[in-house]
């Protein structure tokens, strides 16, 4: 089962976005995107909501609870 970091990386790459572009869209630093993708830290609820809206997916999908 794909974890949060893998799912985030996959969605970002499917849209041909670099970490810097996504970081700007979510108003975080590039290093935060890297840490999230490596599962070194987790986003806050507000950032999860922002990501879900940005990618047009549910928070459950981001968390790997649904396909």
Image (cartoon, rainbow, N blue to C red):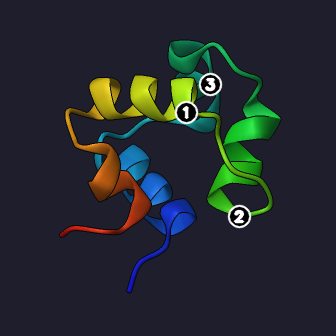
Q: Check disc 1 and report the residue beneath it.
A: 45
| Disc 3 secondary structure class | helix
| Disc 2 secondary structure class | loop
- Residue at 41 percent across and 28 percent down: it is 49
Q: Is residue 28 above or below residue 52?
A: above
- Residue at 55 percent across and 33 percent down: it is 45
| Crowd tier of the residue under label 1, counting other residues whose Cα lies within 10 Å: few below 14, some 14–19, many 20 or above | few
| Crowd tier of the residue under label 2, counting other residues whose Cα lies within 10 Å: few below 14, some 14–19, many 20 or above | some
Q: Check disc 2 and report the residue beneath it.
A: 38
Residue 60: x and y in percent read 30, 55
Q: Would you say the residues marked 3 and 2 are in contact, meaning their CB atoms lie under 8 Å apart?
A: no
Q: Earlier in the sequence, mark 2 or mark 1?
A: 2
- Residue at 67 percent across and 51 percent down: it is 36
Point out the residue furthest to the bottom here.
1
Quadrant of the image occupied by residue 24: top right
Q: Is residue 45 above or below residue 28?
A: below
Q: Check disc 3 and report the residue beneath it.
A: 23
Screen quadrant of the C terminus? bottom left
Would residue 47 be found to the left or right of residue 63 on screen? right
Residue 40: x and y in percent read 80, 61
What distance separates the C-alpha of mark 2 from that of mark 1? 18 Å
């Amino acid at each position: 089962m794909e974890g949060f970091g893998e799912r985030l990386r996959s969605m970002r790459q499917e849209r041909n976005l670099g970490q810097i572009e996504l970081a700007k869209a979510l108003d975080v630093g590039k290093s935060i995107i890297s840490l999230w993708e490596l599962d070194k830290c987790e986003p806050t609820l507000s950032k999860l909501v922002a990501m879900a809206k940005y990618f047009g997916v549910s928070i459950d999908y981001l968390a790997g609870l649904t396909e």
